[in-house]
Image: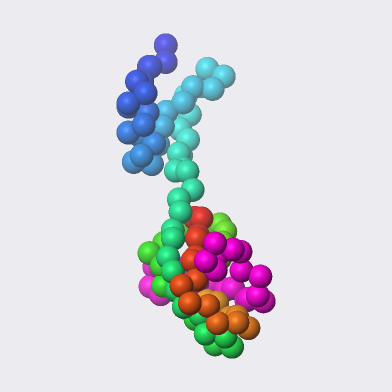
Amino acid sequence: MAKKISAMDAATVIASADLVPIVQGGINKKATVSLLPQKYVATMNVLGGVTSTLVTTITTEPISVYLLDGLDDVTATVKISWSMSGPNFCLDIMSVDDFTGLKVKIIY
Protein backbone atom coordinates (compact mmCIF):
# COMPACT_ATOMS: atom_id res chain seq x y z
CA MET A 1 0.00 0.00 0.00
CA ALA A 2 1.30 3.48 -0.88
CA LYS A 3 2.34 5.71 1.98
CA LYS A 4 0.18 8.82 2.31
CA ILE A 5 1.86 12.14 3.01
CA SER A 6 0.28 15.24 4.47
CA ALA A 7 -0.12 18.50 2.55
CA MET A 8 2.52 20.04 4.84
CA ASP A 9 5.00 17.28 4.00
CA ALA A 10 4.27 17.72 0.29
CA ALA A 11 4.81 21.49 0.53
CA THR A 12 8.10 20.95 2.35
CA VAL A 13 9.29 18.50 -0.30
CA ILE A 14 8.27 20.83 -3.14
CA ALA A 15 9.94 23.84 -1.50
CA SER A 16 13.19 21.93 -1.09
CA ALA A 17 12.99 20.53 -4.67
CA ASP A 18 13.65 17.01 -3.37
CA LEU A 19 12.61 13.87 -5.20
CA VAL A 20 9.03 12.90 -4.52
CA PRO A 21 7.98 9.25 -4.50
CA ILE A 22 4.86 8.75 -6.62
CA VAL A 23 2.76 5.72 -7.47
CA GLN A 24 1.66 5.37 -11.07
CA GLY A 25 0.14 2.20 -12.42
CA GLY A 26 1.14 0.37 -9.25
CA ILE A 27 4.86 0.99 -9.80
CA ASN A 28 6.84 3.26 -7.49
CA LYS A 29 8.73 5.94 -9.40
CA LYS A 30 10.56 9.09 -8.45
CA ALA A 31 9.97 12.41 -10.16
CA THR A 32 11.80 15.69 -9.81
CA VAL A 33 9.67 18.60 -8.71
CA SER A 34 10.36 22.00 -10.17
CA LEU A 35 9.25 25.20 -8.52
CA LEU A 36 6.86 27.67 -10.11
CA PRO A 37 8.47 30.43 -12.16
CA GLN A 38 9.77 33.38 -10.16
CA LYS A 39 9.87 37.10 -10.89
CA TYR A 40 12.85 39.48 -10.78
CA VAL A 41 12.17 43.24 -10.88
CA ALA A 42 14.69 46.06 -11.21
CA THR A 43 15.03 49.53 -12.68
CA MET A 44 17.85 50.75 -14.89
CA ASN A 45 18.85 53.69 -17.04
CA VAL A 46 19.46 53.15 -20.74
CA LEU A 47 21.40 55.58 -22.91
CA GLY A 48 20.36 55.51 -26.57
CA GLY A 49 22.91 53.97 -28.93
CA VAL A 50 24.91 52.36 -26.12
CA THR A 51 24.58 48.85 -24.68
CA SER A 52 23.41 49.05 -21.06
CA THR A 53 23.85 46.00 -18.82
CA LEU A 54 21.81 44.92 -15.81
CA VAL A 55 23.57 42.29 -13.69
CA THR A 56 20.85 40.21 -12.03
CA THR A 57 20.87 37.68 -9.21
CA ILE A 58 19.24 35.11 -11.54
CA THR A 59 21.19 31.86 -11.90
CA THR A 60 18.62 29.85 -13.89
CA GLU A 61 17.75 30.49 -17.52
CA PRO A 62 15.24 33.38 -17.87
CA ILE A 63 11.93 32.69 -19.60
CA SER A 64 10.75 36.18 -20.55
CA VAL A 65 11.53 39.89 -20.19
CA TYR A 66 9.02 42.74 -19.88
CA LEU A 67 10.12 46.38 -20.17
CA LEU A 68 8.08 49.33 -18.87
CA ASP A 69 8.76 53.04 -19.28
CA GLY A 70 6.70 54.54 -16.47
CA LEU A 71 3.33 52.81 -16.77
CA ASP A 72 3.57 52.07 -20.50
CA ASP A 73 5.16 49.29 -22.53
CA VAL A 74 8.38 50.26 -24.26
CA THR A 75 7.58 50.96 -27.91
CA ALA A 76 11.06 52.09 -29.01
CA THR A 77 13.29 49.76 -30.98
CA VAL A 78 15.38 47.76 -28.51
CA LYS A 79 17.77 44.86 -28.86
CA ILE A 80 17.90 42.51 -25.88
CA SER A 81 20.54 39.86 -25.32
CA TRP A 82 21.83 37.79 -22.40
CA SER A 83 25.35 37.47 -21.06
CA MET A 84 26.83 35.97 -17.90
CA SER A 85 28.72 37.44 -14.96
CA GLY A 86 29.94 34.40 -13.07
CA PRO A 87 26.82 32.33 -12.32
CA ASN A 88 24.46 35.29 -12.82
CA PHE A 89 22.55 36.20 -15.97
CA CYS A 90 22.98 39.77 -17.25
CA LEU A 91 20.46 41.59 -19.42
CA ASP A 92 22.08 43.66 -22.18
CA ILE A 93 19.84 46.31 -23.76
CA MET A 94 20.61 48.48 -26.79
CA SER A 95 17.96 51.12 -27.56
CA VAL A 96 17.56 53.96 -30.03
CA ASP A 97 16.01 56.07 -27.23
CA ASP A 98 17.14 57.08 -23.74
CA PHE A 99 15.24 55.68 -20.76
CA THR A 100 15.51 56.84 -17.16
CA GLY A 101 14.10 54.47 -14.57
CA LEU A 102 13.27 51.74 -17.08
CA LYS A 103 11.41 49.01 -15.17
CA VAL A 104 12.58 45.49 -16.03
CA LYS A 105 10.53 42.42 -15.11
CA ILE A 106 12.07 39.02 -15.74
CA ILE A 107 10.33 35.67 -15.33
CA TYR A 108 12.69 32.78 -14.66
Residue 59, compared with residue 32, is above or below; it is below
Q: Visible in this render: residue 83?
A: no
Name the residue located 47 percent from the left edge and 43 percent from the top edge: 36
**Which sits in the foreground, 79 or 70?**
70
Name the residue located 59 percent from the left edge and 88 percent from the top edge: 49
Residue 80, compared with residue 48, is above or below; it is above
The answer to which quarter of the image holds residue 59 is bottom left
Where is residue 26 drawn, in percent x and y? Answer: 52, 17
Where is residue 28 drawn, in percent x and y? Answer: 47, 24
Residue 15 left/right relative to 91: left
The answer to which quarter of the image holds residue 50 is bottom right
Main SS of residues in magenta? strand
Q: Quadrant of the N terminus?
A: top left
Where is residue 74 drawn, in percent x and y? Answer: 61, 69
Name the residue located 46 percent from the left edge and 72 percent from the top edge: 101
Is residue 29 in the magenta section? no
**Which sits in the foreground, 39 or 34?**
39
Q: Residue furthest bottom?
A: 49
Is residue 81 in the magenta section? yes
Q: How is the image coloured?
A: rainbow
Name the residue located 50 percent from the left edge and 71 percent from the top edge: 102
Q: Visible in this render: residue 41?
A: yes
Numbered range of the magenta stretch? 68-91
Where is residue 75 drawn, in percent x and y? Answer: 66, 70
**Which sits in the foreground, 84 or 94?**
94
